[in-house]
Image: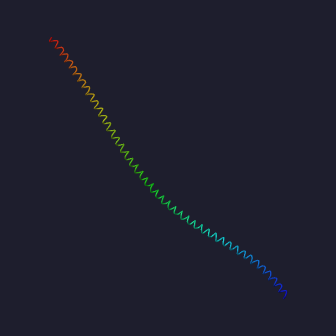
Amino acid sequence: MVGVSIYFAYKFGTVNERMTVLNSQDSLQSVQVESFDHALHDLELKFIGRGKHIQEFQRSVEKLDSKLDDTKQELTTKIDDVNFSVEELKSYTNAELTSLKTDLQETSDKLSTVRRETNNEILDLKQILRRLNRSLKNIEDQVENLEETKMDKPQEEE
């Protein structure tokens, strides 16, 4: 029995040493697990914070997209209005140019008519002037003849 007790005490001592080693390793492991849990908790907090920032960023991006869509719609409307105004101006300008061409043609035709009439009147006036010159010449000739005749008559009376 003494042998068994010594054997039992020896085994109990080795088991106790082993338990002490295991307890120290367990406490070391517990510290490491707690450290890991603490680091994991910190990372989770960081990820939650980053997640909030990402969500805020996503909301900002959505707002910007909405603003861009509104601005795009406004610009499209304004561009359409400007295009419509340009088309109206083009149509009005073309109508005015057509009217101007018509007026110019009418004026040109009237000017040609006036020019022809004026040329005809000038020709008529030249013809009248020639007649008047002839008539004047005839009258001058007659006056000259009369004067000669009158001059001749007083000589006869003498």
The answer to whether residue 6 is above or below residue 123 is: below
Residue 80 in the image: state x and y as whole percent: 44, 55
The answer to whether residue 129 is above or below residue 59 is: above
137 relative position to 12: left or right: left
86 relative position to 140: left or right: right
Seen from this angle, which residue lies furthest left? 157
Seen from the viewer's position, the closer of residues 23 and 158 is: 23
Seen from this angle, which residue lies furthest top? 158
Residue 117 in the image: state x and y as whole percent: 29, 34
Seen from the viewer's position, the closer of residues 139 and 8 is: 8
Seen from this angle, which residue lies furthest bottom? 1
Scheme of colours in the image: rainbow
Residue 66 in the image: state x and y as whole percent: 50, 62
Q: Quadrant of residue 39?
A: bottom right
Residue 127 in the image: state x and y as whole percent: 26, 27
On the rendered image, what quadrant is the N terminus found in? bottom right
